Image: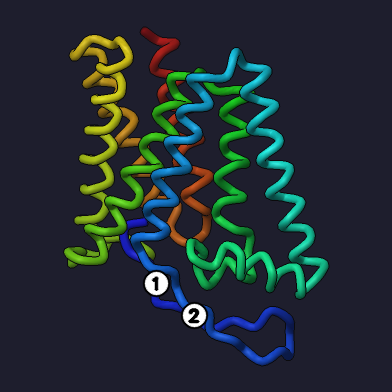
């Protein structure tokens, strides 16, 4: 989320009158991003085992996709849901799958298949490094890379991802040396994935899944 494209005006149905949707305040969406990550991290730590974690994440994913189906079948449902989530929704999410839906889908996959250490780093890096990259990219982004990403935003993503991963790993029992390597892998994987995703893939899905996969491979080779 190094830097986003300007708001677009899109019609819900072909032939309908386009209605502009205001972008949410950056702070509101960033706070929601961080809070969602902390909630996911707490569930990973608190729930008693993989079955509970998978069931809880699966329930969130099921609820999210149920709302997506309702939105597609009813313009009234779409309007109501977008009004409810308006403070943290982007304009394009009125007409496309919501980023939160992709996020809880990623959580369901992580809960079912990923090593828990990888899942922790995946949600932590996305939740904190992604908003940081957006803030830096919007204010200081000058070197364009691809899509709406900037070099400055991507560097902020890596540095923040490394920092929060290292702090978390050390705080939860890893030694400084192993934590530094793992944090660097998580931060770099997240930054590269977020850059490669561009506008084609939702980074709320691909970033945590990619981090968990790479961290899992790294841990099995140790």
Q: How many marks?
A: 2
Tell me which residue sits at (72%, 50%) in the image: 65
Q: Is residue 39 left or right of residue 17?
A: left
Other residues around mark 2 within 10 Å, as few (<14) / some (14–19) / many (≥20): some
Residue in front for this viewpoint, 27 or 113:
27
> What is the secondary structure assignment of the residue under circle 1?
loop
Instruction: Name the residue carrying label 1.
Output: 5
Residue in the picture at 22% in, 21% down: 180
Could you say where residue 217 lies in the image, as x and y percent from the top left?
A: 45, 19
Dot 2 corresponds to which residue? 8
Q: Secondary structure at mark 2?
A: loop
User: Measured along the vertical axis of the image, is residue 46 above or below residue 76?
Assistant: above
Q: Residue at x 59, y 81 (%)?
A: 10
Circles 2 and 1 in contact, beta carbons < 8 Å = yes
Q: Is residue 211 above or below residue 160?
A: above
Work out which quarter of the rendered image holds the N terminus and state it: bottom left
Residue 49 vs 76, above or below: the answer is: above
Pick out the residue farthest to the right.
73
> What is the x, y in percent for residue 169?
30, 19
186 relative position to 166: left or right: right
Q: Quadrant of the C terminus?
A: top left
Query: In this image, 51 relative to 38: left or right?
Result: right
Q: Position of 107 compared to 73: left or right?
A: left
x and y percentages locating residue 84 in the rendered image? 61, 64
- Residue 152: x, y in percent? 20, 56
Residue at 47% across, 27% down: 42
Q: Nearer the viewer, residue 167 or 142?
A: 167
Looking at the picture, tell me which residue is in the foreground, 17 or 155: 17
Separation of disc 2 and disc 1 at Cα? 8 Å
Query: Which quadrant would residue 219 be assigned to in this image?
Result: top left
């Amino acid at each position: 989320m190094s830097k986003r494209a300007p708001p677009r005006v899109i019609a819900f149905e072909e032939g309908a009158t386009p209605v502009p949707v205001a972008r949410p305040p950056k702070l509101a969406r960033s706070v929601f991003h961080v809070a969602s990550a902390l909630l996911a991290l707490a569930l990973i730590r608190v729930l008693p085992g993989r079955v509970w974690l998978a069931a809880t994440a699966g329930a969130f994913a099921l609820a999210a996709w149920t709302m997506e189906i309702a939105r597609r079948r009813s313009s009234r449902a779409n309007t109501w849901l977008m009004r409810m989530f308006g403070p943290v929704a982007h304009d394009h999410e009125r007409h496309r799958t919501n980023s939160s839906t992709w996020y809880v889908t990623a959580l369901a996959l992580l809960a079912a298949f990923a090593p828990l250490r990888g899942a922790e780093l995946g949600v932590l890096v996305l939740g904190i490094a992604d908003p940081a990259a957006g803030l830096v990219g919007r204010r200081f982004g000058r070197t364009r890379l691809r899509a709406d990403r900037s070099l400055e935003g991507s560097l902020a993503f890596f540095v923040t991802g490394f920092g929060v991963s290292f702090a978390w790993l050390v705080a939860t029992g890893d030694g400084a040396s192993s934590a530094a390597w793992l944090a660097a892998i998580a931060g770099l994987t997240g930054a590269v994935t977020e850059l490669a995703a561009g506008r084609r893939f939702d980074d709320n899905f691909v970033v945590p899944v990619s981090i968990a996969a790479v961290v899992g491979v790294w841990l099995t080779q140790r």
